[in-house]
């Protein structure tokens, strides 16, 4: 039955117009406008570490042992840490930086997990590890550009921040709710990004997560780029793209074919009279 | 000329010391495995931020060895070279046990190995190289086992005919003559062997890709890793065959037949070529890595950093250059001892090389300065136990299975 509202000609006209105006590519690459994300503003953070405690409480994780060096690192039972970081550009001042899973828009960890134990929720932004499925191979840790997923030696699975996905989107993640100075926010990504850019511009800061690893659903306003802050630097593109994986695997398949060819040639060249045909 | 050391049947003190050593190591390995389950797996790692260490490198070493052995053995039953048929049985049997003990390493390293077969079947991730490895090894392992069985079943039937009682029944059962009457299955063995060769090579290609895919690990990332994995497996296969064949004859105090000796020397010549090409690859790896901004820091660990001793002494000197020199002399003087020495050196060098490769790739960007990269004590015990179990299984097979070459 013919659709009375839109004809094939109208649709082709629309496509033509859209391609001229660049709308089709926009549409193809468009993120859902209602995508959620988290914004961490290090300029507001006072370093009280309530977010760490709230995370522990919410996820029923054991208390954190304060390390001797006072530099906190994530582990299987610590999903987020706050460390005092100084920039190499300006060593006089420093900022408290909250660090956690950056919830990449296209997570490398999910791409390498052999059992699909890691999934990405495109609306809430959460990258979640299914602990009942995880086989504990730690390939996700290797693939993560930020080295976030950590192995819990007691449960023998990989664990990390899941953005308190059971609370979302009705309630905020526990760390967001616990922050006394609203240094952590949770909301629509496009709005948070706009706000982050404005605030970063005002203080000559840097928005981490806009382009890193192809974009992440955790945005952090830093006072300098991550390399100046002594943080792990992720490439400004999607990490572990599938086409790249195919290219690398086929180099090995090509080598395998070459070996079979070489064996055949060797067998033909060195064949004796009594050998099988 | 092979010098007689001890025969297994003599059961001399050397024999008992050897058996006691293997049993002790196996006991310690079991102790480490049990402790890692009862206690914490953390005891198997020297640093929490370097989760893949000796168990993964030993796994890579064993599986690459298995495919290498399969490649060399296939020259006889797949490519029809009669002179290689005499080592087919030992080669395929070694391929079977190396892959099994290799897999044991990775199973003990997994947090929940029992979930792996379930979820890789029901929720597979085709984008993951790790899934691909599991898929291809699941095809390779049964096929190489079947190939091995097809190669030895005629001899099993002969043993059955020449024995009585339970021994007769057991070997008759093992030969499968009740179900498969014909022993002239060369073509079928060739087809199954070709299948195992293809799937083995594909598995190893994907194994290399497992590391090559990881863009976040700059040292591993790239298309050259799968190629190197495939290539290096061949000289590992030759090294294992030379080592196990010569050492078996020495321990049994038997004289090696002229055909077998000739083949060993032929493999020695191929070995020289492969090692020479391997040295070029190492040179390329170091040079290309040192001018690549992404890999330079890790390559510097090899050249003058924490891994300089393992690299220069084990990888370069013991694993590549000295064996070439020894092999040149051994082939010229037809010395089996020389071949054996070179094979041992290459195996030792390759083992260290795999460890360095796996560990070095994980240092940056996590660490500013490389930590001491020596494996944890419990992990060493576990690997020693697995190694001892591997040699024990081989000794038992040598005693009860017809692996001996027809002279």
Image: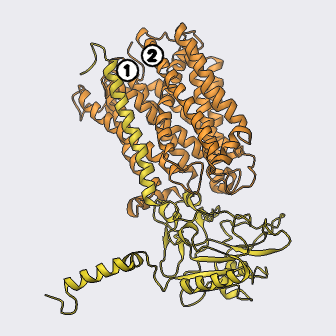
Chain colours: A yellow, B orange
Q: In which quarter of the image is residue A168?
A: bottom right
For disc 1, the marked residue is B84
| Extreme residue in the right direction | A92
Q: In this view, does B67 lie above or below B240?
A: below
- The chain holding disc 2 is B
Q: Which residue is drawn at 61% across and 50% down?
A: B52
| Position in image of residue B155 (x %, y %) | 34, 23
Q: Distance between the residues labelled 2 and 1?
A: 10 Å
| Position in image of residue B307 (x %, y %) | 70, 40
Q: Which residue is drawn at 62% across and 55% down?
A: B37
Q: Nearer the viewer, residue A128 or B144?
A: A128
Q: Is there any visible trace of residue B7 in the rendered image? A: no
| Position in image of residue A242 (x %, y %) | 43, 59
Q: Is residue A208 above or below residue B41?
A: below
Seen in the image, is B56 located left or right of residue B375?
left
For disc 2, the marked residue is B266
Q: Which of B335 and B55 is in front in this view?
A: B335
Seen in the image, is A37 located left or right of residue A123?
right
The local crowd at label 1, few if under 14, some if 14 to 19, many if 20 or more residues have their Cα within 10 Å, is many
Seen in the image, is B263 located left or right of residue B24?
left
| Position in image of residue A232 (x %, y %) | 67, 63
Disc number placed over residue B270 in the picture, else none = none
Q: Quadrant of residue B164?
A: top left
Q: Residue at x 48, y 62 (%)?
A: A111
Q: Nearer the viewer, residue A100 or A90?
A: A90
Q: Is mark 1 on a helix, strand or loop?
A: helix
Q: Which residue is drawn at 56% across and 12% down?
A: B330
Are labels 2 and 1 on one chain?
Answer: yes
Q: Is residue A206 above or below residue B389?
A: below
Q: Which of marks 2 and 1 is in front?
A: 2
């Amino acid at each position: 039955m013919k659709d009375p509202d839109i004809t094939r000609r109208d649709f082709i006209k629309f496509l033509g117009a859209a391609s001229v105006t660049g709308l089709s590519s926009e549409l193809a690459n468009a993120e859902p406008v209602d995508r959620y994300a988290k914004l961490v503003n290090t300029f507001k953070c006072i370093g009280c570490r309530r977010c760490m405690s709230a995370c522990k409480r919410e996820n029923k994780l054991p208390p954190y042992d304060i390390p001797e060096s006072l530099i906190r690192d994530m582990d299987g039972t610590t999903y987020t840490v706050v460390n005092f970081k100084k920039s190499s550009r300006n060593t006089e001042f420093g900022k408290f930086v909250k660090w956690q899973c950056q919830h990449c828009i296209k997570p490398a960890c999910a791409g390498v997990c052999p059992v699909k134990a890691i999934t990405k929720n495109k609306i809430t932004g959460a990258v979640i590890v299914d602990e009942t499925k995880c086989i504990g191979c730690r390939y996700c840790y290797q693939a993560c550009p930020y080295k976030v997923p950590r192995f819990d030696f007691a449960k023998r699975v990989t664990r990390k921040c899941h953005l308190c996905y059971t609370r979302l989107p009705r309630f905020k993640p526990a760390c967001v709710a616990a922050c006394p100075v609203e240094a952590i926010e949770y909301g629509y990504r496009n709005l948070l990004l706009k706000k982050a850019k404005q605030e970063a511009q005002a203080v000559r800061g840097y928005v981490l997560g806009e382009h890193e690893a192809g974009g992440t659903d955790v945005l952090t306003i830093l006072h300098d780029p991550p390399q100046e802050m002594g943080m792990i630097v992720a490439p400004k593109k999607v990490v572990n793209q599938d086409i790249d994986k195919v290219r690398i695997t086929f180099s090995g398949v090509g080598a395998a074919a070459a070996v079979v060819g070489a064996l055949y040639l060797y067998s033909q060249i060195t064949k004796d009279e009594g050998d099988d045909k | 000329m092979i010098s007689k050391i001890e025969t297994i049947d003599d059961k001399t003190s050397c024999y008992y010391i050897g058996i006691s050593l293997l049993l002790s190591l196996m006991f310690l390995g079991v102790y480490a495995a049990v402790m890692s389950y009862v206690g914490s797996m953390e005891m198997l790692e020297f640093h929490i931020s370097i989760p893949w260490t000796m168990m993964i490198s030993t796994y890579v070493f064993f599986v690459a060895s298995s495919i290498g052995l399969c490649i060399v053995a296939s020259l006889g039953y797949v490519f029809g070279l009669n002179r290689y048929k005499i080592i087919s049985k030992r080669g395929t049997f070694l391929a079977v046990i190396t892959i099994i003990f290799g897999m044991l390493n990775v199973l003990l390293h997994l947090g929940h190995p029992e979930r792996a077969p379930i979820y890789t079947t029901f929720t597979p991730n085709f984008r993951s190289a790790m899934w691909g490895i599991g898929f291809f090894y699941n095809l390779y392992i049964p096929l190489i086992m079947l190939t091995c069985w097809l190669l030895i079943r005629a001899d099993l039937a002969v043993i059955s005919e020449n024995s009585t009682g339970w021994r007769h029944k057991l070997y008759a059962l093992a030969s499968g003559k009740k179900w498969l009457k014909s022993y002239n299955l060369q073509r079928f063995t060739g087809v199954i062997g070709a299948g195992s060769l293809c799937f083995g090579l594909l598995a190893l290609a994907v194994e290399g890709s497992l590391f090559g895919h990881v863009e976040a690990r700059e040292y591993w990332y790239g298309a050259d890793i799968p190629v190197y994995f495939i290539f290096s497996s061949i000289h590992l296969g030759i090294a294992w065959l030379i080592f196990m064949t010569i050492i078996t004859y020495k321990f049994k105090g038997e004289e090696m037949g002229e055909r077998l000796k000739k083949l060993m020397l032929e493999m020695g010549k191929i070995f020289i070529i492969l090692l020479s090409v391997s040295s070029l690859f190492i040179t390329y790896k170091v040079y290309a890595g040192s001018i690549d901004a992404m890999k330079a820091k890790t390559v510097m660990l090899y050249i003058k950093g924490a891994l300089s001793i393992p690299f220069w002494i084990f990888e370069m000197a013991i694993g590549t250059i000295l064996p070439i020199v020894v092999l040149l002399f051994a082939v010229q003087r037809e010395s089996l001892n020389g071949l054996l020495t070179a094979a041992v050196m290459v195996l030792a060098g390759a083992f260290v090389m795999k460890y360095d490769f796996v560990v070095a790739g994980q240092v940056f960007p996590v660490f500013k300065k490389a930590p001491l990269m020596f494996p944890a004590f419990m992990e060493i015990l576990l690997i020693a136990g697995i190694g001892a179990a591997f040699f024990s299984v081989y000794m038992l097979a040598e005693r009860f299975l017809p692996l001996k070459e027809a002279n």
